[in-house]
Amino acid sequence: MRHIAIVGSGPAGYYTAEAAQKQFGDDVRVDIFDRLPVPYGLIRTGVAPDHQSIKGVSRRYEETALTENVRFVGNIAVGEDISVEELQQLYDAVVLATGAPHDRPLTVPGADLANVFGSAAFVGWYNGHPQFADLAPDLSGGTAVVIGVGNVALDVARILSKTRQEFEGSDIVGHALEALAGSALERIVILGRRGPHQIQMTPKELGELGHLERATPVVDPADLPPEEADAALDPGLRKSVTLLRQFPGAKQEDKRVAIEFDFFAGPKALVGNGKVEGVEVERTRLEGDRAVGTGETYTIDASLVVSCIGYRTAPIPGVPFDERAGRFANDEGRISGDSAAGNLYCVGWARRGPSGTIGTNRPDGYSIVEKIAEDIGEGSGKQGRAGFDRLAEDRDLDIVTFRDWKKIEEAEEKAAREGAPREKFVDIEAMIRARGQ
Ligand code: NAP
């Protein structure tokens, strides 16, 4: 029998569990740990609440979760309740699927002003992540600046501009829905430090900006390279750039909110007195693919700033970390180093950094399981889950099981607004209480 511990129950974690089942059949026991009492990580708290079809992938993870040889072990913080080293002693293989939950820091003066948020916090707020449920962003000003031109910047700009009706059928949490319904925003500026050809926005997501009830995307035609140059782009990017070309050059009269793309605009500083009041920007130009400052600066008055410039994995004491890349130091998923007993792995964003789609994690999970199969053979008689259960009892750990989660889920579904799939619990105590109902 092989015993595998997976830390993190998001897409990378569940695809790894699915792959382990396919690879080893009945000869494996997989425990999936999560610090929250609820599963699915990024699917629950990262994917936008108005993208329910993407969230639907959790049904596939549930199929894996409900099999005999896979177990969800919620409400257990690895690194606090149990160390990685202890897991390594108990299981044949330990796979870190912890994602990249920290914001890549915005290193400009004023980044610590009030009403400036990283996307992990801001997205966590509207998605009901317990850590960020109390964020209370102030939406009473007229202008927000969103930094970065990736899909997360798109999510944030879209969510900030939607009407209450447009959230129908979504699982945006009540506190965010109410706050957004009272928003006074009329201008959302998306800052790209490079140009339209360097965006990281996918066509489907970018296209959504063209169909908003009260908002319209605006692109200054002067920022667009000559159309012939699009031919050299990858097909996906070419489609996105074509969309940018179709967006109007000025705000449409009948729309209250403008989502303005400000290209060749590098953030230099955030200014304000305690609370953010503006973003100082330097015009850039491209040298090859790199943005260089031109020395020309201007200030955008803004009372809310959301920095969507990427994520970092949370380090775990004793696990080798690549500071520059912001993820675990690894060789194709194998983690070696002083503390490694040769059975520590990482997968998904924790392995390769925050890139790709949810689906990218599937081959990632399958490939790590192939390596595990090579490394651990038939297993080496470790205690696995029985050993963990003893330790959990000794430490009085309160494990939330998958069956408990189904009760929490049922309570969330019962509490849903009309037309919504669920109303999420946003604090851990409430989640834990709900399993007893
Ligand atoms: P991303 O795609 O890497 O985009 C980050 C953006 O931040 C880039 O435009 C980057 O510009 C900019 N940036 C980085 N450092 C900056 C700085 N110091 N100043 C100004 N701009 C800076 O990351 P993401 O948007 O966080 O998305 C993460 C992953 O999740 C991506 O793979 C994304 O596609 C995926 N995702 C997918 C969906 C979806 O499919 N619906 C939704 C959300 C996220 P440079 O290029 O100039 O560095």
Image: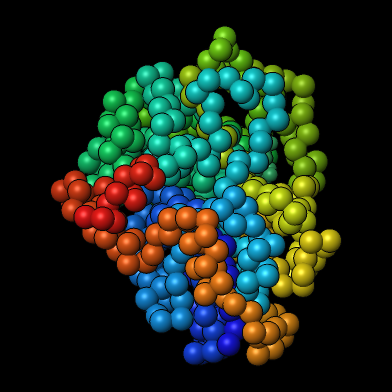
Q: Nearer the viewer, residue 187 or 126?
A: 126
Q: Nearer the viewer, residue 412 or 186?
A: 412
Indicate the quadrant containing the C terminus: top left, top right, bottom left or bottom right: bottom left
Q: Is residue 166 above or below residue 184?
A: below
The answer to whether 326 appears left or right of 304 in the picture is: right
Tell me if residue 246 can be seen: no
Q: Position of residue 356 (x, y in %)?
A: 58, 61
Q: Answer with the quarter of the image where residue 110 lies.
A: top right
Q: Is residue 21 above or below residue 289?
A: below
| Residue that appears at 66% across and 63% down | 86
Q: Nearer the viewer, residue 235 or 134?
A: 134
Q: Position of residue 141 (x, y in %)?
A: 41, 18
Residue at the extreme right of the image, as rendered? 338
| Residue that appears at 21% across and 49% down | 416
Residue at the extreme front of the image, as rendered? 394
The answer to whether 381 appears left or right of 386 in the picture is: right
Tell me if residue 152 can be seen: yes
| Residue that appears at 70% across and 80% down | 371
Residue at the extreme top of the image, as rendered? 273
Q: Answer with the quarter of the image where residue 176 lies.
A: top left
The answer to whether 426 appears left or right of 103 in the picture is: left
Q: Nearer the viewer, residue 249 or 19?
A: 19
Q: Is residue 163 above or below residue 211?
A: above
Q: How is the image coloured?
A: rainbow
Q: Answer with the quarter of the image where residue 63 lies.
A: bottom left
Q: Position of residue 435 (x, y in %)?
A: 29, 56
Q: Is residue 435 above or below residue 254?
A: below
The answer to whether 340 appears left or right of 264 in the picture is: right
Q: Position of residue 424 (x, y in %)?
A: 31, 48
Q: How many marks?
A: 0
Indicate the quadrant containing the N terminus: top left, top right, bottom left or bottom right: bottom right
| Residue that appears at 25% across and 37% down | 164
